[in-house]
């Protein structure tokens, strides 16, 4: 399961050319089995012999190739991504319900809560709620690190009941949530009964940090 920060942060946005009149991407996928490896020479390309000292290496002179082609017919920008498919990589078709990304934000206590992946439906761990939310102020079109003001995360109490932990006030020197590529927080509080209660706590912490009463 990915965290909600993995869901929204660290992704590159493909950009259209300036003054693109109809900024729409067309995305196509192509899978090629037994694509050959080539090596470049000054005169031409030659088929490359795969040589590996590991006798159990699963590679060969050919491989399974996946190409993603992204094109805007209006401005002419094109992106082509090609990679080798292995047992650990490939194509997955799913729904925004399970991905989290693509679902609308919830409007709670003057803030927007952007959902991550849902909690796995396993026994008593089953829940219709997302595992966590990133929190921003209203009017955000795309969630990036600079607009995030908090995070709400699903957890379990001592008796297995659902509760929520809230983090607020992003801070470079914050003591909570530090890690590679992660937002650090100045304030954290747990044991909230609902995401709405956690959001209201975030509103209060933001107001204290900014010296105002507005979220």
Image: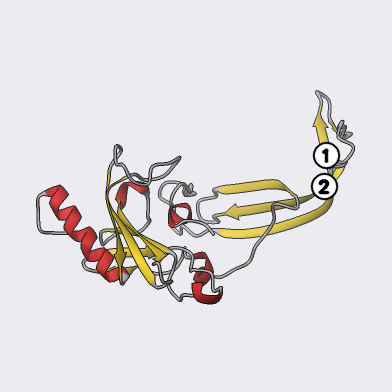
Given residues 122 and 182, the one toward you in this image is: 122
Which disc is residue 63 wearing? Answer: 2
Image quarter in which the C terminus is found = bottom left
Give x and y (percent) for residue 175. Answer: 31, 42
Residue 116 visible, this orientation: yes
Q: Quadrant of residue 62?
A: top right
Q: Position of residue 55 (x, y in %)?
A: 90, 37
| Position of 163 relative to 175 (above/below) | below
Residue that appears at 65% across and 53% down: 68
Q: In front here: 37 or 3?
A: 3
| Residue at image mark 1 | 37
Q: Is residue 47 visible?
A: no
Q: Indicate left or right for 48 with 212 as reference.
A: right
Find residue 79 and report its horizontal and vertical position in percent. Answer: 59, 47
The residue sitting at 52% across, 65% down in the picture is 99
First in sequence: mark 1 vs mark 2: 1
Horizontally, residue 153 falls left or right of residue 65, namely left
* Residue 196 located left or right of residue 59: left
Under circle 1, the secondary element is loop
Residue at point 26% right, 62% down? Answer: 138
**56 left or right of 137?**
right
* Front one among 144 and 37: 144
Q: How does the figure colour the protein chain or chains?
A: secondary structure
Residue at 50% from the left image edge and 75% from the top image edge: 124
Q: CA distance from mark 1 to mark 2?
A: 8 Å
Q: Are marks 1 and 2 in contact (CB under 8 Å)?
A: yes
């Amino acid at each position: 399961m990915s965290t909600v920060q993995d869901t929204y942060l660290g992704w590159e946005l493909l950009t259209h050319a300036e003054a693109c009149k109809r900024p729409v991407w067309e995305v196509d996928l192509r899978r090629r089995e037994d694509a050959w490896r080539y090596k470049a020479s000054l005169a031409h390309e030659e088929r490359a012999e795969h040589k590996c000292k590991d006798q159990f290496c699963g590679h060969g002179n050919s491989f399974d190739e996946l190409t993603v082609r992204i094109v805007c017919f209006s401005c002419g920008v094109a992106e082509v991504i090609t990679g080798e498919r292995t047992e650990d990589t490939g194509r997955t078709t799913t729904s925004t319900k399970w991905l989290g990304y693509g679902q609308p934000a919830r409007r709670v206590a003057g803030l927007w809560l952007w959902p991550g992946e849902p909690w796995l439906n396993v026994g008593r761990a089953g829940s219709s709620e997302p595992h966590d939310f990133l929190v921003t102020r209203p009017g955000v079109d795309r969630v990036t690190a600079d607009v995030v003001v908090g995070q709400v995360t699903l957890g379990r109490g001592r008796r297995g009941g659902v509760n929520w932990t809230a983090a607020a006030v992003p801070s470079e020197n914050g003591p909570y949530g530090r890690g590679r590529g992660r937002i650090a927080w100045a304030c954290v509080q747990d044991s909230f009964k609902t995401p709405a209660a956690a959001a209201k706590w975030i509103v209060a912490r933001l107001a204290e940090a900014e010296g105002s009463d507005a979220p």
